[in-house]
Image (tube, rainbow, N blue to C red):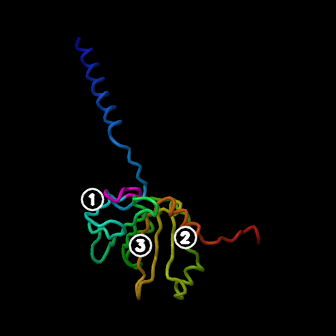
Amino acid sequence: MFGMRKNVSYWRIRHVLMSLIFLIPTVSFSDVGYKDLRIGMTFEEVELVCQSGEVGSQRCPNYSRKPYPIVKVYPNLETTELGLIIVTVGTYDVVFSDLLASMEKKYKNDFYFTDQQLELYNKEKSSELYISFENGTVVIMINKTGDFNQVGVIYASKERGRFFLQKHTPNSVNTDDF
């Protein structure tokens, strides 16, 4: 009798757990994001995380500090889901090396900026440099702002990632041509 009671408890617990699985809505957030912010969240969820009542593109005051980081969130163009997170993390001389090392451990690299792009940036003929990860969904951006080189991280939806790669992937030289 004792063994049968143990079996009933097991099935009762299993039944309750299976019921909960079907009652809880499935959420499909992206794997990329900043802290509790994830691409694909609804803007209602974003407002709770950011502790802000604004809708649309907004600064996320819960994660923004002075002077850094500055966190901004933007909706997807066709839906009411979070499509873009931009985090300005600091100046190049202070944060770049550690940030790059951290991103290289977490994400698969798509491309680094080229020597030619760096030369144009240093001659002030270009104002941004990019390092892309995970099919353009995670990007390190270096941006000239006055006398400073600010570093930011962009987290994007898969659609925006594909668009980014089409627009910014450097042309590569085919070594078979030589």
- Please rate how many residues cluster around mark 1, counting C-alpha atoms within 10 Å: few if below 14, some from 14 to 19, many from 20: few
| Residue matched to label 3 | 152
How far apart marks 3 and 2 lie (CA) works out to 15 Å
The front one of 102 and 16 is 16
Q: Residue at x 60, y 72 (%)?
A: 170
How far apart marks 3 and 1 lie (CA) works out to 23 Å
Q: CB atoms at circles 2 and 1 under 8 Å apart?
A: no
Give the magenta-colored segment's residue range: 38-44
Q: Is residue 106 left or right of residue 49?
A: right
Q: Residue at x 53, y 83 (%)?
A: 126
Q: Position of residue 22 (x, y in %)?
A: 35, 36
Relative to 105, residue 72 above or below: below
Q: Quadrant of the N terminus?
A: top left
- Please rate how many residues cluster around mark 2, counting C-alpha atoms within 10 Å: few if below 14, some from 14 to 19, many from 20: some
Q: CB atoms at circles 3 and 2 under 8 Å apart?
A: no
Residue 174: quadrant of the picture: bottom right
Q: Which mark is residue 48?
A: 1
Q: Position of residue 159 (x, y in %)?
A: 51, 60
Q: Residue at x 28, y 60 (%)?
A: 49
Residue situated furthest top in the rendering: 1
Q: Quadrant of the C terminus?
A: bottom right
The front one of 95 and 40 is 40
| Residue matched to label 2 | 112
Element assignment for label 2: loop
Q: Position of residue 14 (x, y in %)?
A: 31, 28
Q: Position of residue 88 (x, y in %)?
A: 37, 73
Residue 120: quadrant of the picture: bottom right
Q: Which mark is residue 125?
A: none
Q: Amino acid at mark 2?
A: Tyr
Determine if the magenta segment contains residue 40. yes
